[in-house]
Image (cartoon, rainbow, N blue to C red):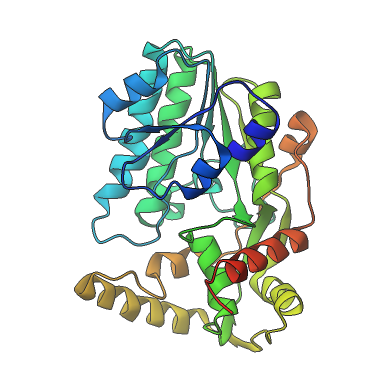
Amino acid sequence: MVRKLVEKKQGEIFCLARPSSDKKFLKDLGVHILDGDLKDPQSLDRALEGTETLFHAAADYRLWAKKPQELMESNVIGTRNILQAARHASVKRIVYTSSVSAVGRPHLGAGDETMDPSASHLIGPYKKSKYWAELEARRFAREGLNLVIVNPSTPIGSHDVKPTPTGKLILDFLRGKMPAYLNTGLNLVDVEDVAEGHLLACDKGKSGERYILGNKNLTLKEILEILSKISGRPAPKIKIPYWVAYTAGLFSTAWAEVSGRPPEVPLDGVKMAREAMFYKADKAVRELGLPQTPVEKALEKAVKFFRDFGYCV
């Protein structure tokens, strides 16, 4: 998103980053980098002074954390802090990055912006924190803040540096750590289309509205078969029952609680996969002009990035 803002010469660009963050790719773009933290309101007040437009895309995206309250502090309280700072600074326009986690999980068909999750959909601290954070954003919009919400589905592509849980799925396949697959599905979208969707939402989105930034619904089996064609690695042929995945997640997560190391199979991730997470991006395509780059190209870019930067061979 920052790269697209630079390319389109969208004025002076300031990026808030924690002092401990890896800023390599931001430094390469030549933008102003400000030290700060969503949990430090004073740093947010300083950063937003004189700002006209805010893209709030920061979040703690983990499916397991030794201290789950950290996700609430960053995602919920942090969102409240930065939106309060934006109001104090009289920021003219805000785009808030939510998630389809805040939309809910459809039981049949594909979900859209009219949905809200039920309690059973809010699995784990990440999903709960993103939903409660979006409720904060909606409240600020109702109170007069000029704010539009975007809900990315499953972004894939280049520069997933940590990687996120989404990128880890691809990386696990490339490293040969996926001998079997679960009967589930995801809505994939090129991360560059998601970035473009943020800029389009800023220009064309209606304040208080939400827009799903997605593209193609695919089963996990189909995703792995596409990755196989791109990478040359064989796709797993064994479909495991849900109870087997659940048991693996149970033991893996229990060991993580003891060791403090993230689980190879997060239990919350297994629970989320029980139903296909399919969504429709029709509203964003129609009202914003959201691009729909073939997801096969996005998967190619993800594989190339992980290989070029030494994550795998």
Q: In terms of depth relative to the viewer, which is nearer, 111 or 73?
A: 73
Residue 260 x, y percent position in the rendering = 23, 69
Q: Quadrant of the C terminus?
A: bottom right
Rendered residue at 76%/78% (across/down): 229
Q: In terms of depth relative to the viewer, which is nearer, 24 or 152?
A: 24
Side of 86 where 93 appears, left or right: right
Is residue 39 in view? yes
Rendered residue at 43%/52% (across/down): 61
Side of 238 where 120 appears, left or right: left
Q: In terms of depth relative to the viewer, which is nearer, 234 or 304?
A: 304
Q: Quadrant of residue 77?
A: top left
Is residue 103 in view? no
Q: Quadrant of the N terminus?
A: top right
Residue 224 x, y percent position in the rendering = 67, 75
- Above or below 286: residue 278: below
- Above or below 80: residue 255: below
Residue 118 x, y percent position in the rendering = 46, 47
Side of 54 where 203 appears, left or right: right
- Above or below 65: residue 135: above
- Above or below 190: residue 116: above
Q: Quadrant of residue 131?
A: top left
